[in-house]
Image (spheres, rainbow, N blue to C red):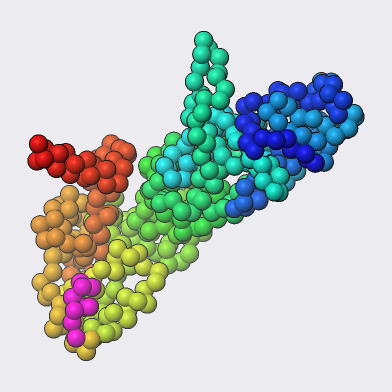
Amino acid sequence: MSEQGTVAVLHLSGLLRSPLTARSGETVGRVDDVIVRLRGADYPLVTGLVAQVGGRRVYIANDQVAALTQNGAQLASERVDLRSFERREGEVLLSSDILDHRLIDVAEVELVRAWDVELEKTPEGWVLARLDTRRPARFFGLVRQGDGHPGRDWKAFAPLIGHNPSALLRGKQGLLAKLHPADLADLLEEADKAEGEEILEQVSADPELEADVFEELDPDHATKLLGSMSDDEVAGVLAHMEADDAADAISELRQSRRQRVLDLLPAGQRTKVLTLMGFNPGSAGGRMNTDVIALPPANTVRQAVEAIAAAKDFEPESLVTVHVVNETGQLSGVVEVITLLQSEPDAQLSSVMDDDPVRVLPETDLEDVALLMDDYNLPTIPVVDHEGKILGVVTVDDVLEEIIPEDWRRRTPDPRGEAVAGDSEAASGGSGD
């Protein structure tokens, strides 16, 4: 666009259906859409227009536009190239793909709708700068333009456009990777089918994040999503999940798929999953983590700390306690990490361990496990067989996940800190009268 008018900001809602005029001023068509090219973390650059000319939907390149204003677009010549528009890789249509579509508000962690788009003039050209996500006011049923809603920075959103070649470029922004898995799970549960598929497509670029998201999903929703995936894809997700969650997920698959998926799991994960599937899901055995650090009593504190540091594939929650076992694998004691850090490095574990630890059997009900953990203020509790040999460990997050009511887990929490601040202000206000 050789000259782009005198305005610095354009609203898409006003530009759409505005006149497309020749250099002489004669109206030759209407602006139907605006094309931008995604550029990773940079603002998308306007590369042209789509116009309706004589009943045809045609492409108007930037170099054919002399001026772009809120009143319409003026061509640099008297003629229009009647080439039909064909979307190219990385191109997004602002009206078709963004306007009135839902996007992810990364800061607020919610799906919002774009009611208008703001274009801003820069030295590079027009760019997609801001979105208006507030529903426009209506006057006698008509939308009122220019209500003055402040647009929000385009970079605060992760768009869900559904155009696959463009999705590859959108993924470079990595906005979804900044969200907590529980927040991504909430978004997936709110999203429609197409939106959910695109969220999963972006999340799947990080297998660990994808697995974490599936662990946070409502079981019915997770089962539905896994049911739409191939056996290889399901195994890829379950391979990175905690073994107890993977066991639950496999048990919810159709009977005809379970063995096929199990056969595709890495050997170590398959062994853990099969072990857990032998227990009741509502018992300690069904929820335990089989990754535990078990050391002989003659080992030193230094060796225990080194073992924790080396256990990079273990879940962090299971590393807060070291388990001391005798030569036959029976549990002799436990040592919490804080005790290790406060003890002499050369001290033997037998001298710093709790030699009468609380323990449970695999068949112990999870509610009883929760009561024991509460009574003894335990972050983890070991699970042993009837001979006292350690089988695994139940962590506090596993217990909470099982016993917290579903409606509590899915409620929307207060914004961080606001409730406390409000209470403090109320208290100070009362005392100041």
The residue positioned 51% from the left and 57% from the top of the image is 206
Residues 348 and 276: in front is: 348
Residue 220 painted magenta: no
Query: From where the camera sits, is residue 335 visible?
Result: yes
- Establish if 33 lies above or below 213: above
Snapshot quadrant of residue 174: bottom right
Residue 317: give x, y in percent of width and height.
29, 63
**Could you tell whether 288 is left or right of 352 in the image?**
right
Q: Can you say which quadrant of the picture contains the N terminus?
A: top right
Q: Which residues are magenta?
A: 336-344
The residue positioned 29% from the left and 65% from the top of the image is 318
In the image, farthest residue toward the bottom: 346
Q: Can you say which quadrant of the picture contains the C terminus?
A: top left
Residue 322: give x, y in percent of width and height.
24, 73
Snapshot quadrant of residue 63: top right
Residue 135: give x, y in percent of width and height.
49, 26
- Establish if 304 lies above or below 414: below
Residue 342 painted magenta: yes
Give the tally of numbered discs: 0
The residue positioned 46% from the left and 45% from the top of the image is 106
Residues 123 and 360: in front is: 123
Residue 180: give x, y in percent of width and height.
40, 51
The residue positioned 55% from the left and 37% from the top of the image is 131
- Establish if 60 lies above or below 334: above
Residues 51 and 79: in front is: 79
**Could you tell whether 253 is left or right of 388 in the image?**
right
Snapshot quadrant of residue 99: top right
Query: From where the camera sits, is residue 86 visible?
Result: no
